[in-house]
Image: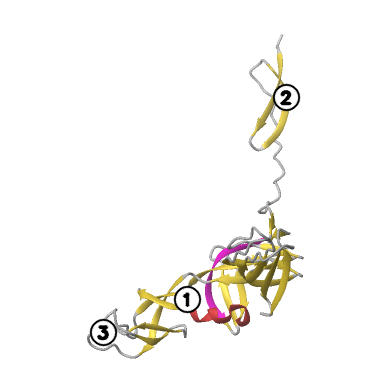
Amino acid sequence: MARTATATLSSPYCILHRSSFSSKSSFLPLRIFPKTPSPPTFPRIYALSSNDIKVGSNIEVDGAPWRVIGNYVFFFFALILFTFLFFHIIFDFLFITFRVGVEFLHVKPGKGAAFVRTKMRNYVTGNTVDKTFRAGSTIEEANVFKEAKQFTYKDGVQFVFMDLSTFEEYRLNDADVGDKTKWLKEGMDCNLLFWNGKVIDFELPTTVQLTVVDVDPGLKGDTAQGGTKPATLDTGAVVNVPLFVNIGEEILVDTRTGQYMSRA
């Protein structure tokens, strides 16, 4: 008499399956049940304290992302302490996208509640507003992320960036680009900032290589230790360069300061 056995089987891509089979050489076919694909996951959003905001933090206030550019924090205790820090934050406020700069001023002249006074710039309109937070209050981290895209061309008043793997295009208007346009060159890789599926800003490379198209000719004997002269680059930007730099030369420029770095 043939004996039977029961086994529980599984595979990396199927659910558990219980099957009985005979000790004879033949087996019943086993049906495989693939798992249902899991839904995509997104980075976890954390709650931050207004005292713990760091450079590059993304925070959300009332449903909109903001970046802080000017901030003053006042603490009222027995001692006096002044500390200046500079931050670049993105956070949400009143469903409007803002870029804000942060500068912290810690003051302890007496007793009382601490607060953070912040100056913020609207991503969309460019307007600035003042906002006050209680020190230590909870602020939600904003779901802002970066993706590398290539600036391909300008279409009227729009700057077109492309994802080189999908060939999908993303567009920013003149007002969105602002004075960054003087460093933009076709074929340049940049970081686009996304929030809620929309492009809200972009970041230039720290260093760009550009061509000098107009400059006074260098004089014999000019050296790197000499003075400087204004030079017009192929993007329209004007920077001060050493006296020995001539038309047609490639130079490196720091986009954060707009200063000449070296020959390319």
Labelled disc at residue 19: 2
Q: Residue furthest left?
A: 221
Its colouring scheme is secondary structure
The quadrant of the rendering that contains the N terminus is: top right
Give 139 or 19, whichever is nearer the viewer. 139
The alpha-carbon separation of the residues under discs 3 and 2 comes to 88 Å
Give 148 or 26, whichever is nearer the viewer. 148
Which region shows up in magenta? 143-154
For the residues labelled 3 and 2, say whether their Cβ atoms are less than 8 Å apart.
no
Q: Which of marks 2 and 1 precedes in the sequence?
A: 2
Give 187 or 26, whichever is nearer the viewer. 187
Q: Which of marks 2 and 3 precedes in the sequence?
A: 2
Labelled disc at residue 222: 3
Q: Tag 1: residue type?
A: Thr
Labelled disc at residue 66: none
Residue bearing mark 1: 257
- Against 233, residue 40 (above or below) is above
Give the residue drawn at x 29%, y 79%: 225
Q: Residue furthest bottom?
A: 216
Q: Which one is in front in this view, the residue at disc 1 or the one at disc 2?
A: 1
- Against 110, residue 13 (above or below) is above
Main secondary structure found in the magenta portion: strand
Q: Tag 3: residue type?
A: Asp
Give the residue drawn at x 53%, y 73%: 151
Residue 238: where, in percent of width, then height?
Answer: 44, 85
- The secondary structure type at the circle numbered 3 is loop
Residue 149: where, in percent of width, then height?
Answer: 55, 67
